[in-house]
Image (cartoon, grey):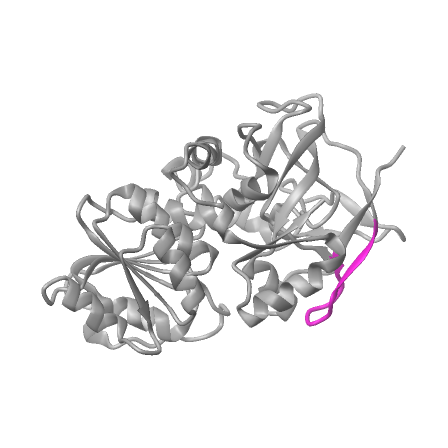
């Protein structure tokens, strides 16, 4: 008998998500069916809703989720019914040019299949009640009661981490904390500036702390977010409406600039600030993003001085290694996740949750199932 469940479906850019019944496809040999227990609302989902990221429709959004494994295919490995899992949105083949160079985020199959908004094998895992093929964002489509994914995307984590905290690890926390710990070359005693204090930026603050930074300068326009950054380890809080971040970075370092700048605002002006605020020989890691067709302007001189610029989409994630480690860091009190959750909402309130995200009122709204 086919599985019928509720999901939030986007039928066209600019429109609302519609809660409707969908039908799951049968499990393939390596598939895992996960009962979703919590899913976070991320800016990437909002970009699809608003048309900044263009995908085929109709589509189920949601790519930051945690749940319980209910059933596995006969050839699924590394996961079993009853496991508590965090879902990863970066499946990879393991053998292409980029996977061989330890860059699974650039896996050739991943990039080729991603634009189709289907499962990693290029086929759907759910359909609308009328039989039409249903797309799924970032190989997941987790805004629903269930999600069917390949075994490599379901990562077991300790059972004692609550689902609403665990789901955050799957995107925002991994992206921000991972950028500081896995991507940036932060050394003990460094001065790190984090531009933008949403879920990713606050996680980057914590990653910088765990990596050994001595001074962490958090920059935002929102005083409440800055206060959270201070609670998570930032040593200096800068409201960019009142202070110029570049000047603060230079004053804090004897005129040099920050050793590492982690940009997580996704704003052309902030990309420009990141290049000005870092010292010669320092490192910039861009985490935020804008429409892929938009231009960003820089003062050419700001790019000189042997500065290193990197783009990071998933914090150098190795999910089977990093997700359990981040979960354990939370359980041990070294990583703060509770404070990232602004609201817990129902699936029926998903459009209200995105309205709060648009207004800048939410760090993370989490759908509870």
Residue drawn 50% across the image and 43% down it: 169
State the residue in front, 141 or 74.
141
Residue drawn 12% across the image and 64% down it: 256
**Residue 17 image position (x, y, % from top left):** 74, 62
Residue drawn 58% across the image and 47% down it: 64
Q: Is residue 176 magenta?
A: no
Q: Quadrant of the N terminus?
A: top right
User: Is 363 displayed left or right of 46 in the figure?
Assistant: left
**Residue 350 image position (x, y, % from top left):** 70, 59
Q: Is residue 20 magenta?
A: yes
Q: Is residue 114 above or below residue 360?
A: above
Q: How many marks?
A: 0
Q: Is residue 326 above or below residue 363?
A: above
Q: Quadrant of the C terminus?
A: top right
State the residue in front, 284 or 65.
65
Magenta region: which residues? 9-21
Q: Is residue 78 above or below residue 14?
A: above
State the residue in front, 363 or 274.
363
**Residue 315 image position (x, y, % from top left):** 40, 47
Residue drawn 64% across the image and 44% down it: 38
């Amino acid at each position: 008998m086919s599985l019928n469940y509720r999901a939030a479906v986007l039928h066209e850019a600019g429109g609302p998500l519609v809660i409707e019944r969908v039908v799951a496809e049968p499990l393939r040999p390596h598939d895992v069916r996960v009962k979703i227990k919590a899913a976070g609302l991320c800016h990437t989902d909002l970009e699809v809703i608003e048309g900044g990221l263009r995908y085929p429709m109709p589509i189920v959004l949601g790519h930051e989720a945690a749940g319980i494994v209910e059933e596995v295919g006969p050839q699924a490995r590394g996961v079993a019914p009853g496991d508590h899992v965090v879902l990863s949105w970066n499946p990879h083949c393991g053998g292409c040019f980029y996977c061989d160079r330890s860059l699974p985020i650039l896996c050739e199959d991943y990039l080729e299949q991603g634009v189709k908004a289907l499962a990693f094998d290029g086929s759907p895992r759910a359909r609308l009640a009328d039989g039409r093929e249903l797309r799924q964002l970032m190989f997941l489509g987790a805004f629903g009661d269930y999600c069917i994914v390949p075994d490599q995307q379901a990562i077991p984590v300790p059972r004692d981490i609550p689902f609403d905290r665990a789901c955050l690890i799957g995107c925002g926390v991994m992206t921000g904390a991972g950028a500081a710990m896995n991507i940036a070359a932060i050394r003990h005693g460094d001065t790190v500036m984090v531009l933008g204090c949403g879920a990713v930026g606050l996680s980057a603050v914590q990653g910088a702390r765990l990596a050994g930074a001595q001074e962490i300068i958090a920059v935002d326009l929102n005083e409440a977010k800055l206060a959270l950054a201070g609670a998570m380890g930032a040593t200096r809080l800068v409201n960019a409406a009142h202070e110029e971040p570049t000047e603060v970075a230079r004053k804090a370092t004897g005129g040099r600039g920050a050793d590492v700048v982690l940009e997580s605002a996704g704003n052309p002006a902030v990309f420009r600030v990141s290049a000005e605020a870092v010292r010669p020989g320092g490192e910039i890691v861009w985490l935020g993003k804008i429409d892929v067709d938009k231009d960003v302007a820089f003062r050419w001189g700001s790019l000189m001085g042997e500065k290193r610029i990197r783009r990071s989409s998933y914090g150098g994630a190795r999910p089977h290694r990093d997700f359990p480690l981040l979960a354990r860091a939370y359980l041990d009190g070294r990583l703060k996740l509770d404070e990232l959750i602004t609201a817990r909402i129902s699936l029926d309130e998903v459009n209200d949750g995105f309205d709060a995200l648009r207004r800048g009122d939410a760090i993370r709204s989490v759908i509870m199932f």
